[in-house]
Image (cartoon, rainbow, N blue to C red):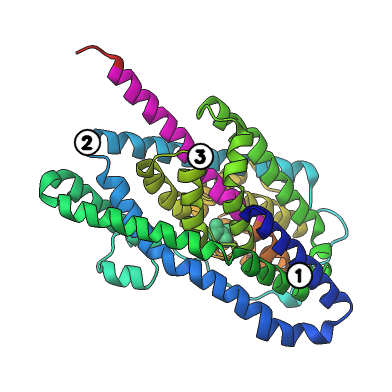
Amino acid sequence: MSLTARILTGIGLGIVTGLILNFFLPDFFTPLNTYVFEPLGKIFVNLIKMLVIPIVFVSLVLGTAGISEPKKLGRIGIKTIAFFLATTAIAIFLALVAALIFKPGVGNFQLPAEDFEAIEAPPVMETLINMIPTNPITAMAEEAMLQVIVFSLFVGFAIARLGEKTNGLKKIFEQLNDILMYLVQLVMKYAPIGAFALIATVIGGEGLNGIAAMFKYFSLVVLVLILHVLIVYCPALSILGRMNPIKFFKGFSSAMIVAFSTSSSNATLPVSMRAAQDNLGVSRTVSGFVQPLGATINMDGTAIMQGVATVFIAQIVGQDLTIAQLLTVLLTATLASIGTAGAPGVGVIMLTMVLTSVGLPVEAIALVLGVDRLVDMFRTAVNITGDAVCAVIVDHSERRLEQTNANIPI
Ligand code: ASP
């Protein structure tokens, strides 16, 4: 059986086990969860997480160092950021339109007021300023991804500029990269068991009830996520990346499944980079630059959730959003998704920022918290897919440029 098939089997068994425990043997769930599922799931997540900071650092240094001309670095950087911003804006637009059409919050839904708890919106401006680490070691120790990224970009740039002088170090980084990629492969052998355990924990704990209460909201987010993949990623892949979407999903599905079961773009990064490089043929330079950056700032799935959730909450509290407010949501949800760390559940915390911007009660996120664990699985899979699509496209356009340059007679 292929790895993807084995992970899918793990997920299937996890769902069945979770449902059986939730419906028929609820007394057994807690001990089983505490002593079997949670530890098994945690071990899997820890194993991948162990590789994340080293991979972000090493791959971004190599990715940047590999682009020796500042012009090329600037070009790749601009293409990447432009793609990230454009797709995120389209994602939120789709989410808003869908939520306004389907009205998930209109109907006989009750406000579970007792569930409200005050949560503060994190200051986004501060996050932006703090992108430059005062201490790179602290940044790594605290997993401050944006800071680690900025530091890695600087080191990579220096290696590229110093050329010959730093060749030795560049070699060492290449070898470190080989070691890390080998370890990813090793860790992934455990993925089927890890995925089984993670899913069993969620389904066993929430059962179907958790889903049913907010079914409309949940299914609308999932619908828009699928739409986004179909009408944005697929055409972008074939037109801009000249890659058959089927080939893409065949090669990338293992990473999507890991994203689905871990709900963490960061934790999935090692797997998604490996899939892009080995199965989709994206160069190490482009993948090493685009994917770690994307895992940190490009979250189309999260943006979609924030768009749908905002309209959903507005409808529940009976507030009509004006065009100006919808535009504000577009802007703030773009920023909020950039500021969302690629870890489980962060997107819903950043949602508070969007709600505040249009004067909706921040506490109302309690309305979507119930199903957020499940929504998170789907949106994270879309988040990392967007990064990989961008990597394929940038890689294709760089190759074409190189070919054109090579064909110009000197
Ligand atoms: N879990 C998401 C991710 O890692 C972030 C979010 O909570 O939306 O991509």
Inspect the image, locate mark 2, and give the three-letter code of the amino acid beneath it.
Glu
Please give the range of residues in magenta: 378-406
Mark number for residue 280? 3
The secondary structure making up most of the magenta span is: helix
Mark number for residue 408? none
Disc 1, SS: helix
Quarter of the picture holding the C terminus: top left
Quarter of the picture holding the N terminus: bottom right
Which residue is labeled 2 in the image?
69
Instruction: Find out whether residue 384 is within the magenta segment.
Output: yes
Q: Residue 133, how many percent across, how many down?
A: 28, 64
Q: How many marks?
A: 3
* Relative depth, front residue between 214 and 362: 214
Is 268 located above or below residue 69 in the figure? below
Q: Quadrant of ligand 1?
A: bottom right
- Identify which residue is drawn at 72% across, 64% down: 371
